Amino acid sequence: FPANRWAMPGNRQPRVRSGNEPRPAPTMEPEGRGAWAHSRAALDRLEKLLRCSRCTHILREPVCLGGCEHIFCSNCVSDCIGTGCPVCYTPAWIQDVKINRQLDSMIQLCSKLRNLVHGDKLSGVKACLQRKACEQEEKYEIPEGPQRSRLNKEQLLPKLFDGCYFYLGGTFKHHPKDNLIKLVAAAGGQVLSRKPKPDSDVTQTINTVAYHARPDSDQRFCTQYIIYEDLSNHRSERVRQGKVWMAPSSWFIDCVMSFELLPLDS
């Protein structure tokens, strides 16, 4: 074949056939929009699926009643056990109540993601990515419980349950007893092997004070808690006498989450 068989007139380069042209580089969206906006929208859609069938808020400690597929916050169905599902009226019994631990983990993960992608105060990861440098963590930390916990540790103050004793009574399915015991130890409290007696002179004369109790509350005098599970059919007589109070396990968990010795309803 002649050497110039494939040469184009005027030394022009051969044109690439349609369909084989390289794709143009994707256009970059302005910072603060684009991927972050898509992430927020996807998170909003996911959270709509994680709402309680009764209160319509984001599920808190999600449980199903066994006989149907409706999911509720544990507190929303405590009055339905022994009757029926408040949505479809399927009979519900205590042995049918099941905790959806995988869903609970997903909800906690969504909460952390929301803190990362929403708002300027909590967008530490976003700030690091935009500036391509590590930002000061304290500027973007999650407020309330995590922040109080950090400050408490930095100031070398007593741990959350310092001066408190806990007796875990009855059966624990929703919050496993082993996990509660670990939380008590990690927060500076102590676990009692015997149920405290409110009318005992020994019990009432224990000379300890709950450091993190509100100073204007009579709860500062309480140092011994009898913890029971909210969804359990175990119901002891209500105790609130001197240094011995009875409290649900959900209160205990809320105290840990908020790093605060929360007041108990009368």
Image (spheres, rainbow, N blue to C red):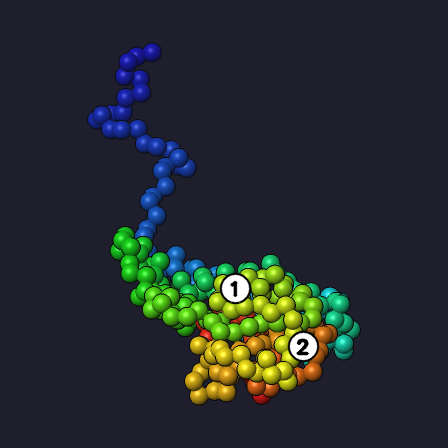
Compared with residue 152, is residue 1 higher up or lower down, i.e. above or below?
above
Mark 2 or 1 closer to N-term? Answer: 2
Asked if residue 168 shows in the view, the reply is no
Asked if residue 79 shows in the view, the reply is yes
Q: Residue at x 61, y 61 (%)?
A: 178
Q: Secondary structure at mark 2?
A: loop
Q: In the image, residue 39 lies at what x, y percent?
A: 43, 59
Q: In the image, residue 44 lies at what x, y percent?
A: 49, 66
* Residue, disc 1: 185
User: Callout 2, which amino acid?
Assistant: Ser
Quadrant in the rendering for residue 177: bottom right
**What separation in Å lies between label 2 and label 1 (alpha carbons)?**
28 Å
Q: In the image, residue 86 lies at what x, y percent?
A: 70, 77
User: Callout 1, which amino acid?
Assistant: Ala
Q: Give the left or right position of residue 31, taking residue 175 as reference.
A: left
Is 174 in front, or is 189? 189
* Residue, disc 2: 78
Q: Secondary structure at mark 1?
A: helix
Q: Residue at x 57, y 86 (%)?
A: 242
Q: Residue at x 47, y 79 (%)?
A: 209
Is 141 in front, or is 202? 202
